[in-house]
Image (cartoon, rainbow, N blue to C red):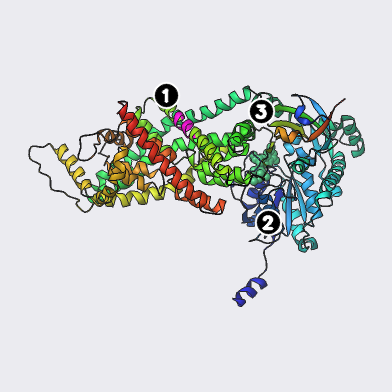
Amino acid sequence: MKNAAQLKPGEIAVIIDVDNDHPSSHRILEIGFTPGQEIQFISGALFNDPMAFSIRGSIVAIRKNEASCILIKPKH
Amino acid sequence: MYSDQTETLTKKRIPLITLVGQPNSGKTTIFNFLSGKNFKTVNYPGSTVEYYVSRILSKHAVDANILDSPGIISLVPSSPDERLSVKALHSHPEYGAPDLVIVTVDSSQLSRHLLLVRQLQDSGFNVVVALTMIDILHRKGFDISETKLSQLLGCKVVRINGKTGEGIDNLLGAVKEGITSEQAGRRLIETRTPNSKRKEKLLESYREIESIENEVLFTLKSAKDDSRSSLASINEQLIVLGNNVRNRPDENTLRLDKILLHKFWGLAVFALIMSVTFTLIFWLAAPLMDLVNDGFSIASEFAFQALGDTWYGNLVSNGIISGVGSVMVFLPQILILFLILGLLEDSGYLARGAMLVDKPLSAIGLNGKSFVPMLSGFACAIPAIMATRTISNKRERFLTIFIVPLMSCSARLPVYALLTAFLFPPEDTLMGGIAMTAIYLFSIASSLVIASIANRLSKSISNLNDPSSFILELPAYRKPKLSVVGANSFNNAMQYVRKAGPVILYLSVILWVLTYFPNHTPQIDGAGRSEEEIVELTNSERIATSYASYMGKFLEPVLEPIGMDWRVGVSLVATLAAREVFVSSLALMFKVTEAGDDIQNSLLDAMRNAKIEGTGMKLFTTATSIGLIVFFVFALQCISTIAIVRKETGSWTIPALQLIAFTGLAYFLTYITVNGLRFIGVN
Ligand SMILES: Nc1nc2c(ncn2[C@@H]2O[C@H](COP(=O)(O)OP(=O)(O)O)[C@@H](O)[C@H]2O)c(=O)[nH]1
Ligand SMILES: [Mg+2]
């Protein structure tokens, strides 16, 4: 399954789930990355790490490995 | 003892109102309006790390204490520090449980911020919602109905304009009602959701919030066009617009971030901003410095003429005015440093900076969130060390605290500025600026090297199961308000004067006494000498036989290897009170002011002529000046820093380590620099 770390700049996707096993998963949910929400990958720093996403009208930067626990499907 | 307690019990307790909200949601702004205080508000998540309490201004006619708190994302803590914040919210160790909580909700990020409101209500807090950042919501093309929101949440909702203070009256009305309601005395329940249920509970809250959001937000256009139309029809329009429009971040911010967060351009702009900052400090300040210099020079000369060549004339003109003046000359540079930092803080760029450097910093055991404390370390290490509280990983936080004192704080600025002015003529602002930038870059590079070494060394000691994380909201860009930033910088600079001023003053007087007595009128054989030579001889004889020299002579064996003499040694010891004192102390030791001369130039002249006592060797050479710069880059000469590190880390280990390692390193590297430069023929 695709995860948010694999998105390309500008790409939009819909969150399906957040992997509970990641130590940051709860914080990621709290900050608004919940299933059903649309996210857009805005831009990444060097090596795409950290990555900035638009979520619920805010821009939030998270590390690449934290983004990889956000499971997504492409938006149609 | 007992009677004391009953007295406090019978005395009417002043109600406590706590401001709670996500980081950067406008809490401190409201706190300042209510308390009349002027705490710093910064466009960066995590700018308040302490609890501040104040009585609400009497003109507001609400008798209560208001508590400003560090931002929290949710009531479910995910780090030990957050656990403390949440505990303190339920019952602050000093101020107790709040009678009322004002939750700040950024209306342009409604759903994310309503989560906390829901959690607070679930825990039984007596809640009033303050809607902030309405202007940003308008910029997005939306407005919000606070009556509807109030109905749906079941608590009072007030909108506040953080720029003008509009709405504060309504907030006070809601507060007045809130603290007298029976809700105020309600007991709080600390909700403990079992881990397995946490996710489910959270998703449920968010679903509920999303449906609230759908009902309270409406497009500005529709509100203007047909103000008579019912809310229902407006909501219909909203449904047509759909979620994606409402959930777009601020468009200007997105556009700017295309460049500022770009893989390569972003880094280029970052490097540019950092280097322009340090260069600007030097040459923008030059004309202002001349002004201050002239002012103090005139005052010193005036005092000398008015009081004559007596001991008190000497004390006032040489001891006090030129001592204080020699440091205050550099105040404009400090002001400009604060100004630039303030502009960066207010614009919203800092969070981007943190994101851009996260990867390289985490390679050496730091975190992107170390960036802001490191940058504010250029102003002063003490607030910078407190700012590390936003780093949730303990190891990364302690490592950041470890290296923050290596950042060139504003107290070092006068020392560097004097020494670069000695190396390059003060008129040569270009070279001066380059030298200054080089010193800053050198201090940053050294701190990074030291961090990576410390990281390697401590890896074996510290536990590693504390996961590292970087989750940071990037706030919307804002045009910095020059009036606010200007006023803030001015306040900071004045605070600098108030803090350093008295120390410089006292030490100048003490040093003056130590250098003037006991042999204040030495016998000089005047035969065949000009008057000028006699004055000079008298001065040097007086100092050479003064109390200060007795004390300084003890230090001579340590100082000789690094090319310094006892006078520099006494000045270095004096820096333990404040680093800037080095400059005023040199001014005193070398007895600089002669009537009609300006303070800075005569100090530079005196430094050029100074000889190591008993030898013909020049004391201040290119080698020893660079050596002194190196010494100041590394040495931990600040008692307040040691105290705050002890407090923040909870033990003496780190401050002791810093004191020994940094000061030892300073001495060692100065030794190498001075002797190395001499060896290759630079003198
Ligand atoms: N545009 C706008 N900015 C605001 C408003 N209220 C506060 N701010 C700014 O938002 C930033 C964060 O405010 P602050 O009070 O420090 O938030 P805190 O972190 O919750 O204490 C600061 O730069 C404030 O000047 C508002 O209503 N509109
Ligand atoms: Mg604050």
- Residue B220 in sight: no
Q: Position of residue B223 (x, y in %)?
A: 84, 34
Q: Chain of mark 2?
A: B
Q: CA distance from mark 1 to mark 3?
A: 33 Å
Tag 2 and tag 1, C-beta contact below 8 Å:
no
Amino acid at circle 3: Ala
Q: CA distance from mark 2 to mark 3?
A: 36 Å
Name the residue that disc number 3 marks.
A45
Residue B391 is labelled as none
User: What is the total number of numbered labels drawn onto the structure image?
Assistant: 3
Q: Position of residue B71 (x, y in %)?
A: 68, 47
Q: Give above or below for B11 relative to B175.
A: below
Please state the quadrant of the image where ligand 1 appears. top right
Q: Which residues are magenta?
A: B437-443
Cβ of mark 2 under 8 A from ligand 2: no
Q: CA distance from mark 2 to mark 1?
A: 52 Å
Q: Chain of mark 3?
A: A
Give the foreground label among 2 and 3.
3
Find residue B399 and report its image quarter: top right
Q: Secondary structure at mark 2?
A: helix
Amino acid at circle 2: Ala
Amino acid at circle 1: Leu
Find residue B673 and report its image quarter: top left
